């Protein structure tokens, strides 16, 4: 039986009751084997931080009424883009950046192309020039997946003292 996965779009101003808790529960399932890590335990703070940002958007995948995964992010304030500390120099006047903060799918629904659908839906109508995201350097297969989606690694950062070291990856949205 083929599952129909429904993608639902949300923005900062149309988050339903219980939305943030749903994201936290999906995260807890997606990272069940790593929830003893203090950095992963701070995910509720990240949900609050990102969902309050101007331009926040989120795509949630559902199998019926069951959330299977999500992707979210927000535009970065021009001149304060954290990724610009890398050696990457955008050419052709690329300036505005959309940060993809999270793309995750619960284990039961992995390997079905849902993460790519979430990612594509998140970026499909973006007007920014670039998308940027971070990938834990200990997950080279995830980095390779993002490379197949058009990202290139432009440096590495450790944004918090207790966070992993991340590959900074950038994608031109309007080549």
Image (tube, rainbow, N blue to C red):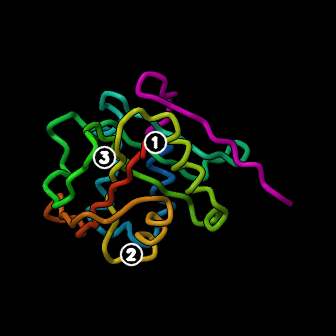
| 146 or 17, nearer to the observer | 146
| Residue 46 as seen in the image, left or right of residue 60 | left
CA gap, disc 2 and disc 3: 21 Å
The crowd level at tag 2 (other Cα within 10 Å; few <14, some 14-19, many 20+) is few
Q: Are marks 2 and 3 in contact (CB under 8 Å)?
A: no
Q: In this view, does 95 lie above or below 119?
A: above
Q: Nearer the viewer's eye, disc 1 or disc 3?
A: 3
Q: How many marks?
A: 3
Pointer 2 or 3: first along the chain: 3
**Rendered residue at 18%/49% (across/down):** 82
CA gap, disc 1 and disc 2: 27 Å
| 9 or 147, nearer to the observer | 147
Q: Is residue 13 magenta?
A: yes
Which residue carries the number 3 mark? 46
Q: In this view, does 33 lie above or below 24?
A: below
Measuring from the top left, give residue 64's x and y in whole percent.
73, 44
Measuring from the top left, give residue 36's x and y in whole percent.
33, 69
**Rendered residue at 36%/47% (across/down):** 131
CA gap, disc 1 and disc 3: 12 Å
Which residue carries the number 2 mark? 139
**Rendered residue at 31%/65% (across/down):** 153
Which residue carries the number 1 mark? 21
Q: Dot 1: what SS?
A: helix
Q: Nearer the viewer's eye, disc 1 or disc 2?
A: 2
Measuring from the top left, give residue 79's x and y in whole percent.
14, 37
Residue sitting farthest toward the front = 92
**Rendered residue at 29%/54% (across/down):** 42
Q: What stretch is highlighted in magenta?
A: 1-21
Q: Dot 3: what SS?
A: helix
């Amino acid at each position: 039986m083929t599952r129909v996965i429904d993608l639902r779009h949300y923005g900062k101003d149309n988050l339903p009751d219980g939305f943030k808790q749903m994201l936290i529960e999906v995260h807890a399932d997606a990272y069940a084997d790593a929830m003893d890590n203090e950095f992963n335990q701070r995910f509720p703070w990240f949900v609050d931080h990102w969902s309050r940002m101007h331009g926040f958007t989120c795509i949630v995948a559902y199998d019926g009424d069951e959330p299977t995964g999500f992707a979210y992010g927000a535009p970065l304030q021009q001149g304060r883009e954290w990724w610009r500390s890398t050696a990457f120099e955008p050419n052709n006047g690329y300036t505005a950046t959309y940060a993809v903060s999270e793309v995750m799918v619960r284990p039961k629904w992995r390997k079905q192309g849902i993460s790519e659908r979430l990612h594509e839906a998140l970026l499909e109508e973006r007007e920014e020039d670039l998308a940027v995201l971070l990938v834990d350097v200990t997950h080279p297969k995830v980095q390779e997946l993002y490379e197949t989606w058009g990202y290139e690694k432009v440096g590495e950062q450790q944004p918090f003292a207790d966070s992993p070291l991340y590959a900074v990856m950038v994608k031109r949205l309007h080549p």
